[in-house]
Image: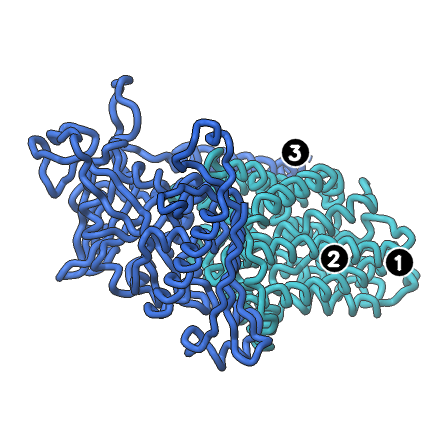
Amino acid sequence: MKRISSRQLYFFLACIAPVGKLLFLPTQLANSARNDLLFPMLASYLVQAGAIFCVLLLAKRKMNLYELLENTFGGIAAKILISIFALFLFYATLVPLLEQRLFVQNVFYDTLPSLIVFAPYYIFAAYVISKPLSSHGRVWDILAPLSVFGFLGILVLSVGSADFGALLPIGAGGIRGFLRGTMSATNWFFDASIALTLLGKFDYGKGMAWKGALFYLAGGVGVLTFLATFYGIFQETALHQLFAFSQTSQYFSGVTVLGRIDYLFIFALALVMAFYCILPAQAGVDCLLQAYGKPRYLPTVFSVLVTGTLFIISLTLDYRFSEVLEVISGTMFWIFPIFTVMLPILCLLLRRKRREKA
Amino acid sequence: MKKHKFLKTIPMKLYLILAVFIIFYFFFNDFGLVDIQKTAVILAVGIDKTDNGYSVTTEIAVPKGSDRKMGGTSSLEIVGEGKNVSACISDIFSKTSWVPKFVFCDLIVIGERAAKEDVFSYLNYFIRNKYMPESCNLAVCEGTAQEIISSQSAIDDTSSLAIGKLFSDASVKSGMVMPNTLKDFTIGYFGPSKSSYLPYLRSTPQKGSHTHGGSGGSNSSSGGSGGNQVEEQAYSAEETALFSEGRMVGLLPHELTFAFSLLKGNVHAGNFNAKEDDADATLTILEDEGGVELDMKKQKVTLSLDLHARLCCKSVTSEVEEIASEEASDEALESAEKLLRADIEKLWNTCKEADCDLFNLRRSLYRSSHKKYEEWKDDLIDSLEVEIKTNVNR
C-alpha cells in the first residue's frame, strides 16, 4: 500500500486545507463578526491545530482509526462508531461541494448556466473517491505549489486595494459577534477529522505532532492575511461579497487595462478546491473500507453511492444554499466540534496496547 | 462462478452508465453562451425620478454589422418606466424582449432630481445584482440622466464610452475629476461617515459640430428613429457632488474639486493658475502630498488639512532665454499658496454647511475609539477646530 510521506502531510495541512476557507467563509464571518472577523477565524484555527496535534500523536500507535476503536471497544462497536463517523464526513462534504458548484456557476459563467454544467464534476468526484485515500499524497505534491501560486498571486494583486484601517476598532463586534462568528465557522473546520482517517497511512516521525500543528497554523496565517485584505477592500459591504477569493483581485489597477489576468490564479485555486471539497467524502469511504474490508468492487460501489446521493442532494438543494448553510452552520453547528475536536481528543484515551486476538 | 464474475463487474457497468448519461445530458446544455441577438448588453444605466416613480435609461450595445470601415461600438437607448428600478428593467424587457445583462455595465448616471432623494432606494437593485460589477463608475448629472445617456457624443458613437474617458487615470492625475465607483460609494454610505461624493456631469453642445440625422451609431427608442436632428455634445465632470446619507447635499465647483484632489494626494502633473506680476502664471504640480488628520489629544478635537506640493512654472510670458527654466518665482509660489489655502478653507466650509463628512472624519474617529465615536459622532463636524497647513515649494 502507498504511504503518505510527512512532506505530503505537511503540504496538505499548510497549502491544501486553507483553500476551502476562502470562498464563503470570509463572507459568513463578515456577516457575524463584522470588522472583528479575524478573531473567530484565529480561534477556530487554534482549536483545530490543537486537534491536529492530538491526531498526529495518535499516529505513534501505528494503527488506523478502525483498529484504534476495535482495540478498545471490540469489532461491532467499532463498526458502528466508524460508520457514524463516515456519515459525518459525508455530511461535511455537503457545504464545500455546494459552494464549489455555486462558485463555478457564478464566477465562470456570465449568466446562470443550467444545472448540468457542473454534472461532469460528479464523474470526476466518483473516480477520485473510488481511489485509496493514501494515493492523495502524490496529488498533494502537485497541488501544493499550485495552491501557493494561486494564493500568492491573488494576494499580491489584492493587497494594494485594501484599507487595513477598516479592521479597527478592535472589539467593535463584541463578544457576541465573536461567538457567532466562531459558531458559524465550525463547518469549514473538519481538517482534524480528515487527519484521523489518514492514521495508519503515514509513519510518525520525530516531532511530527507539533510540526503538523505548526504547518496548519502557517496555512492559517495565510488565510488570516487574506481575510484582512478581503475586509480591507470591501469593508462594510464585505457581508454580501460571495466567492471571496474571486472578488478581491479585480480592483488591481492592471485589470482595467489587461483584463481579468487574476483568473489565472483563480483557476489555480479552483483546481485545488476541486480535490479538497470531495476529500471528506473520500475520507468517509475510506473509513467504511477500514471497517468492512476491501474487496475490489467495494470502493467503486461506495463511491458511486456517495456521489450519486450527493448529486441528487445538490440538484434538490439547487436554490437553497442559504437555507442549507443556515441549518448546518446555525442550528446544527455543534455537530462539527464533536467530530473534529472532541473525537480527536477522546481518541487519545483509547487503549494503547494492542489487544491480543483470540 | 459466472454469477460471481457478473456481480464483480456490476459497479463498473453502473459507473459507465452514469458517466454516459451525465456526458449525454451535459452536451444538451447551452454552456452558458450568450445569444447576442436575444440579450441586451447594457453599457450604461441612467436613473431619473419621475412623478410616478422612476425612469431607467439603458444604453445597449448593438452589433455594428460587418462594415469594417466603421469602428467602435454602436448603441441603442431604451427607456423603461416603473415604480422602482426592478419594474423599469421589466418594462425594458417587455418592450424589447431582450434580457438585460449588466455584466459589462460600466457607468450609472443619476439624474439631478433622483439625486435629491436617498440614492440607495434604487442603487440597492444594482448592489444586490451579483452580475453587476461593483467597479462600475457612478456619476450625477445636470438635468436628466436620460438626456445625457441619449445624447450624441462628439468624440464617440456611444455616449457612455465618451463619459468613461472622463474618469480615466490621466484625468484623476490632472486633479480635474474625482471619480467614484459603486463599491466605494456604497462603503461611504454604509460606513460611519455616511457621506461620499460623485462627479457631476454636464454636457455642452459643440460649436460647429455636425448634427446627426438619426442614422448614426446612437438612436433612442423614445425619440423615434430616423430624421430627428441631434446635436453633438461634449461632456465635463469637473464639479463634484457631495452626498450625505445618500442624498446630494452640495456641489463643489471645479477649483474646489481640484483642492479636494490635492488633499487626497491624487494630483501629478495637474495645472492651475496663480498670479505673477499681476499676470496669470500656470503652475504644474510635480509632487502632491495631501493629508487629513484628526487630532484628539488636544482639549478640543482638531482637524488638520495638510498640503505639501512641489510646483514648477509652465507658462508665463518671458524672454526666449527663460523658456528653458521652469522654476516658479517666489511671487508665483506665494500666490499659489494663498490660492490653495483659500480653496481648502472654502472646501471645508462647503462640506460643513452641507453636513457632508467628505474627509471621513467620523470614520477616523470610529476607528480610533468606538467609545468616543458614540459620544461625538453627532456634532463632530460642527465642533471641530480646523488647522490648514500648506507648504508649497519648488
Chain whose colour in the figure is cyan: A
Amino acid, disc 1: Arg
What is the chain letter for disc 2?
A
Rendering quarter of residue B105: top left
Q: Tell me what residue is drawn at x 72 percent, y 46 percent.
A: A133
Q: Tell me what residue is drawn at x 67 percent, y 68 percent.
A: A337
Residue A250 seen anywhere in this rendered image of the structure: no
In the image, residue B277 above or below residue A163: above
Chain whose colour in the figure is blue: B
What is the chain letter for disc 1?
A
Q: Position of residue B18 (x, y in %)?
A: 51, 38
Label 2 packing within 10 angstroms: few (<14), some (14-19), many (20+): many
- The quarter in which the C terminus of chain A is drawn is bottom right
In the drawing, what numbered circle is on residue B2?
3
Badge 1 element: helix
Taking A40 as reference, is B139 left or right? left
Q: Position of residue B88 (x, y in %)?
A: 21, 53
Amino acid, disc 3: Lys
Q: Would you name the residue on which mark 1 appears?
A: A61
In the drawing, what numbered circle is on residue B387?
none
- The quarter in which the N terminus of chain A is drawn is top right
Amino acid, disc 2: Leu
Mark with earlier residue (2, 1):
1
Q: Are marks 2 and 3 on the same chain?
A: no
Label 1 packing within 10 angstroms: few (<14), some (14-19), many (20+): some
Marks 3/1: CA distance? 43 Å
Q: Would you name the residue on which mark 2 appears?
A: A217
